[in-house]
Image (tube, rainbow, N blue to C red):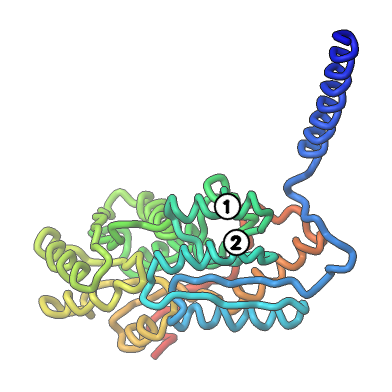
């Protein structure tokens, strides 16, 4: 009897070991970079575009381009956004999209631990691909498939070259940044410093200006006290440009300074037309929306695997005040 029990237990162990090893082989043999494509599901994917700033003209253009590409590819697209840049609601929308088991998520990158945990752990473990659009997050920190948008490092270099062309090879330049810099802002700043650092007679001063209009105005007023001889300002965060210019205008002639920013929003375009900004970087938000959806569908269909981890950069150009007036 004892021999019989031992034999049964041994056989059971062998069977369990077989299935365990078999399962492990299947798991490790599975290429995580390749989508599982069912023959019957060549179209009709459910995609979600999630933004933090839905009520801005920039993101309205991204949505327009994404909707057009979704229609062309036979995919359904839902746009979920927040108003007033509510980060909690933004992150909750990502959670809901993952729980809903959508086929793909296209999302404005947010450089926070909460965002990275959602994309790197929750979305990846559910097999849902993520593409960041307009604002990126490093791939190794987020496991996003790719990024579609401007090359912000290059954008910083472009605006810095324009500044040097206008101001010359010497002077003091103030770089106004947010207290909490997103990855795209850090990239812009690096690009600016890469160029300005080549000129030993150009001095740069980096000023953290907060995020509210009041904080930006206060920081600008302080830097005017600390650096009265500054000849140029760059608003690295475009939504700070008006507050910076308004505060400068209370104490100095804005026209006597060189002032630059990014993003062709209605507000910054108005400042450019008024001659209060010397130049800004024009982006292509509609193209960002189109390409992000197109790439997502191609990946889901297995037509483009893997996607370029470095991203797909859309067009940019420097627009000067003379062109806008």
Residue 142 drawn at (x, y percent): 55, 50
Residue 230 seen in this snapshot: yes
Q: In which quadrant will I find the N terminus?
A: top right
Residue 28 drawn at (x, y percent): 77, 36
Residue displayed at 35% across by 87% down:
270
Q: In which quadrant will I find the C terminus?
A: bottom left
Which label's residue is closer to the chain start, 1 or 2? 2
The answer to whether residue 191 is left or right of residue 128 is left
Q: Compared to 77, does 181 lie above or below?
A: above
Residue 109 drawn at (x, y percent): 50, 61
The answer to whether residue 209 is left or right of residue 186 is left
Residue 150 seen in this snapshot: no
Give residue 98's mark.
2
Q: Residues within 10 Å of mark 2 (few under 14, many from 20)?
A: many
Task: Please give the residue where the numbered disc 1 appears in the rendered image.
Answer: 122
Residue displayed at 35% across by 84% down:
267
**Pointer 1 with pointer 2, Cβ within 8 A:** yes
Residue displayed at 60% across by 61% down:
98
């Amino acid at each position: 009897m004892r021999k019989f029990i031992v034999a049964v237990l041994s056989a059971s162990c062998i069977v369990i070991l077989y299935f365990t090893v078999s399962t492990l082989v299947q798991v490790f043999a599975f290429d995580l970079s390749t989508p599982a494509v069912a023959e019957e599901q060549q179209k009709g994917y459910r995609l979600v575009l999630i933004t933090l700033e839905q009520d801005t003209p920039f993101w309205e253009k991204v949505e327009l381009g994404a909707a057009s590409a979704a229609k062309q590819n036979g995919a359904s697209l839902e746009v979920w956004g927040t108003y007033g840049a509510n980060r909690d609601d933004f992150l909750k929308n990502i959670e809901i999209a993952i729980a809903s088991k959508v086929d793909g998520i296209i999302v404005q990158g947010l450089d926070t631990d909460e965002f990275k945990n959602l994309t790197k752990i929750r979305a990846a473990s559910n097999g849902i691909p993520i593409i960041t659009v307009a604002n990126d997050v490093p791939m190794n920190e987020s496991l996003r498939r790719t990024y579609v948008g401007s090359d912000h490092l290059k954008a910083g270099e472009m605006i810095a070259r324009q500044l040097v062309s206008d101001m010359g090879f010497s002077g003091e330049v103030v770089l106004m940044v947010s207290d909490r810099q997103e990855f795209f802002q850090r990239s812009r700043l690096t690009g600016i410093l890469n160029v300005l650092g080549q000129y030993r007679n150009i001095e740069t001063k980096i000023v953290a200006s907060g995020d509210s209009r009041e904080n930006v105005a206060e920081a600008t007023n302080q830097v005017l006290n600390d650096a009265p001889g500054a000849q140029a300002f760059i608003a690295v965060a475009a939504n700070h440009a008006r507050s910076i210019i308004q505060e400068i205008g209370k104490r100095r002639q804005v026209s006597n300074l060189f002032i630059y920013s990014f993003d062709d929003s209605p507000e910054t375009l108005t400042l450019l037309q008024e001659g209060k900004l010397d130049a800004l970087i024009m982006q292509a938000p509609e193209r960002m929306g189109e390409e992000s959806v197109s790439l997502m569908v191609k990946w889901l269909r297995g037509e483009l695997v893997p996607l370029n981890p470095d991203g797909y950069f859309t067009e940019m150009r420097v627009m000067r005040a003379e062109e806008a007036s």
